[in-house]
Structures are given as C-alpha cells and as structure tokens.
Image (cartoon, helix red, strand yellow):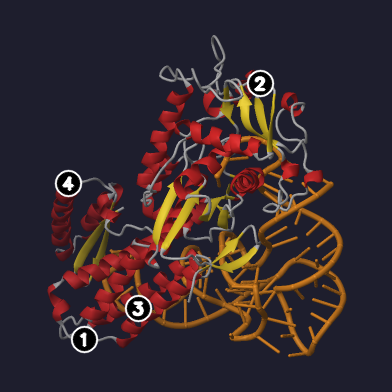
Amino acid sequence: MTLSVTDTLRDERVEFTVDGDEVTLYVCGLTVSDDPHLGHARLWVHADVLHRWLEHLGYDVRHVENVTDVNEKIAARVGEREAWTAERDVAETFTAEIFESMRGLNLRRAEVYPRVSGHVPEIIDLVESLVAAGYAYESNGSVYFDVTAFEDYGALSNQEIAELEAQGEPDERAEKRHPADFALWKAGGVSEAAVREHRKHDHEGDLPEGETWESPWGEGRPGWHVECSAMSMTHLGDTLDVHMGGRDLVFPHHENEIAQSEAATGETFARYWLHAGLLSMEGEKMSSSIGNFWTVPDALEELGVNVLRTFYAGAAYRSEQALTDETIAEAEERWDRLSRTHDRAVAALDSVDAHAKASDEALRSAVETTRADFTAAMNDDLNVREATAALLELTDAVNRHLDAAEDTSDGVAYDYRGLRRAVETFEDLGEAVLGLRFDAAGADAGDGDVELAGELVELVLELREAAREAGEYERADELRDALEDVGVTVEDGPEGPTYRFE
RNA sequence: GCCAAGGUGGCAGAGUUCGGUCAGACGCAGCGGCCUGCAGAGCCGCCCAACGCCGGUUCAAAUCCGGCCCUUGGCUCCA
C-alpha cells in the first residue's frame, strides 16, 4: 500500500514515489504584512500532516518554507507604528508572529525558513541567467519574463496565453512585450500608487518606498514570483519533490514559478504539486484583504491547538472547508471524545487493577483495524477525516472494554496489553501523525500551577463527596457548578468523581 | 469574458482516481433505553434523510460522456 496524492499539474491522482528515502518539501509561505490567520494555518497544518506522514512512512523530510519579507504591502505599512521606520521593521514584527503561531500549532519545524531579503544575490543570478538564455528582457531598468518564449506556459493552470489579461499596473504594461509577461525585477522603489492602495492608515510625511538593491539593471526590487524559485532551488536543488501551497496561488504565482525555474535549469521544477483548498467564512474565503479573518494567536487562545487541529482534520486538504460555529463545535466534540477516551485508558493502565490478566479480543482486533484503516486513509491522498474517523471508532472499543472491565462484581479486570496497544495507537497516530497533544489537555491551563490547581480541585471534591454522602445534593451541585464556572468539569463515576480542566 | 475547483442527508463531510463490494462512513444535531441522587461521560438501540438539473453510454452510474444551472477561487497582493 503506497501513498497517492492529487497532483495539480497532471490533474489526477498519482502514486507518490521518490528515489531513495529523502523527500524535499517546499511550502509556499506567506507575505509578512499582517497577522497570520486561520486560512494560513490550514495550509500549515496540512503541510505539517504531510510532513509527519512521510516521516511515519520512513522518509527523511527536508522541509523548506519561505518568508516573503519584501513586498509592497509590507512597505505600505511603514510609519503605521512608531517602531516601523523601515520595511524590514514591519516584516520582523510579523515574522516573529508567524513563528510564534507555528509553535502554538505544534508544527514540525522546517529545515530552513529562507527570507527574500537574504536571497537577493541568488534572485539576481537567476534573473541574469534567464536574460542570458533569452527568456527575459530588460526594459527601463526592469526585467520581464517573456511568456511566449516558454513553451509550456499555462500548463499548471490551463491558461492560454492569448486569453490572458494584462497583468500588473498600466504604467508597466508599456514596458512589456506581451501583456502576460511578468516582472522578475522592478526598477526603483515601491510606487506611490501601490503604497496608497495598501495603506491602512493616514500617513504623515513622505510615503515609504521600501528597500532597494543594486543590480545589473540599476536600483530596484525583486519581482513578485522569483523569490520562491530562487529560494527553493537554493535550498533544495533544481528539482524538488513536493511543492505545496494554497489553491489561490495556482495562477499566476505557481505558473510563473514553473516558467522561470524550468526556463533557467531545463529541469522539472517540482515533481508533485499539491494545492490546499481555501478556508471559507460566511461564504467567502478567509483573507486579510477581505477582513473576515480570525488570527492564529486569537484562535489558539480561544480553542487550543487540539480543537484547531481536529477542525482541520475534519476536511481533506484539497477540499474547501467552512468555518462556522457548528463546524468548530463539531471539532470540539470530536477532540473531547478522543481525549477523554485516551485519558480514561491511560488512567486504567496506571491503576493498580491493571495487572488483571483479562484479554479482550474485540479490543485487540479493533486496535489492528484502526491502524489499518488509518494507514489506508492517509495513503489515500491524505484523507485525514477518514483517518480521524478510524481513531474515533477505536474510542468505541476502548470505552466498551473499560465499561465491561469496571462493571465486574468481583474486581476490575483490564486487558492490559490491549489497552496499552490502544493508547499507543492514539499516540502513534493521533499525536505523531495528526499532531494532537493528549498530554496538553490539562497543560493548556499553565505550567507548575497545574499541580497546585489539581490539589485544590481535589480538596473541593472531597467536600462535595462528604455532602453527597450526607444526602446534601443541593450543596454538592453548587460545588460542581462552582468548579464548572472556573473551567473544571466534574464527572461522577463508579470509582468516584473525576475532573478535567477545560 | 477566460481558467480552475466544487454542488451528496437537518449540519458538516467522506466516497468519484479503478462503474457493481456504496448510497446511509466518522462526527454533530434529534429520539428512546441502561447507568446516575441529578447532571455529565460512556454504552446500546432508533427515527428521518441526500448523490444540482437534463440527456447519453452500460446488464449496472454519486462515479464515465455531453449540455445546462448555481457556488467558490483565480485572471491584481493573497495560503
């Protein structure tokens, strides 16, 4: 059973194969001009799950994700805050936020997070080689890619060059030979028009022009698509295995990347193109420019990493996904169910009753079924919803076993091996592959204070038990409600009450 | 206008690559039962109910082909 993925260029499901055991993965990262939002996080999480699944399959994953820190939108915000005196100040602010968000989302680290500002020489080299090879031409200090010179232009997005509308601003159109030609290098600084378009505040004084660099064509800035080609080829070589990005980047961004990369090297740029569907909110895509977004730090604060990742695991990477109160609620329920069952099984394993030699064939076969189903689902184009469903089906078997084991009149009889295999399955697949953190359910509350909080909760529960034994249920319910108000859920069971921090 | 991705039950969302094993995945919501002082969790059971529309191919179509309608995305910075 091997992994298959949906490749945009070939427009079909294809078997995933590489020579050797190393996979190079390039994720089209974002432009650091604003807070990262849940749409960005969706791509991140799916790329992360791919990364984790490839590791699970035994591959050594070389993951590179760019940070575009040179862009008109970034330059346009200079002056908006006191500390933002230059383009790079704005970029640094949001770059730091991205890394913090990524940590919060429990993403595997990439090997390199290259920035445009650190790769201008490589970009200039690439542009020079394209000019030398006849694929690009200089015009008034800018350099444009000649789309008519590249035979396969339009293959990724099925565009006909003749149909393409002019790209870019009117004043630069005059510099182009064909309206679909795109800029590799732009003379001068950021235009006044661009700054005004992307401004989010009334600016006092001079308009920012952004950073510029010396080049063979004079002072200027890199074009809008070359950075990904230059950076991915610098760090991963002329041909990379997987190029992943949002579906909204297929055209023109990725189309142009293919053109400029393959024109320069004569080699296939990316062997597999994976595109993640967009996250919609109220019927349209979540987007910084539309303003209908929820930032990653805010969502992490409100929902926690596990609910967020369970939410993302609720839809295949290539589908669109809707963010609504209901879909979030569903994710919360799914995560709670997984987490509760996992914790319950761990508690059983830790209990003194776990030595019993019971054997539950239904549980043991459910574990094997789950592992097989999970693997099949993931290999089937990373079907994370079905994979999650497999884990959820295991919760049935685990709970059934625990219910039965705890119900015996002559002592508790757990199937120690079966339970251990079940817990390992939750952890090998849920944690290592889906990136969930069962251990973090309580730790979300804080750090060393958790222990003290637990002791205090137990103190209250002792008081409540005393009230219950005395038949003072009103008092007992008051205590339970009071705990609920501070985020502690109390559940009574045959072994006494248990509690969870929510 | 051009290109792309989609339209499956009350919601959400698999299944379409390779037509039959698929129409009722998993979950949420709803109903009943067990358990419980109650609640929650858990377990058991149940109701209801969908393949956008129209044709075509086939013994057989959610799946293939054609046409149409609609939604979203792209064609301008965008994950």
* In this rendering, the label closer to the viewer, 4 or 3: 3
Res A182 → quadrant: top right
Mark 3 → mark 2, Cα distance in angstroms: 61 Å
Mark 1 → mark 3, Cα distance in angstroms: 16 Å
Q: Secondary structure at mark 2?
A: helix
* In this rendering, the label closer to the viewer, 1 or 2: 2
In the rendering, which numbered label is found on residue A448? 4
For residue A19, side relative to residue A58 (left or right): right
| Residue at the spot 38% in from the left edge and 51% down from the top edge | A107
Question: Which residue is tagged 2?
Answer: A193
The amino acid type, in three-letter code, at marker 2 is Ala
Q: Please provide percent x and percent y for residue A322.
A: 57, 53
Q: Residue furthest top?
A: A205
| Residue at the spot 34% in from the left edge and 61% down from the top edge | A431
Q: Chain of mark 4?
A: A
Mark 1 → mark 2, Cα distance in angstroms: 75 Å
| Residue at the spot 59% in from the left edge and 58% down from the top edge | A319
* Disc nearer the start of the sequence (3/2): 2
The amino acid type, in three-letter code, at marker 3 is Val
Question: Which residue is tagged 1?
Answer: A358
Mark 2 closeness class: few <14, some 14–19, many ≥20 residues within 10 Å: few
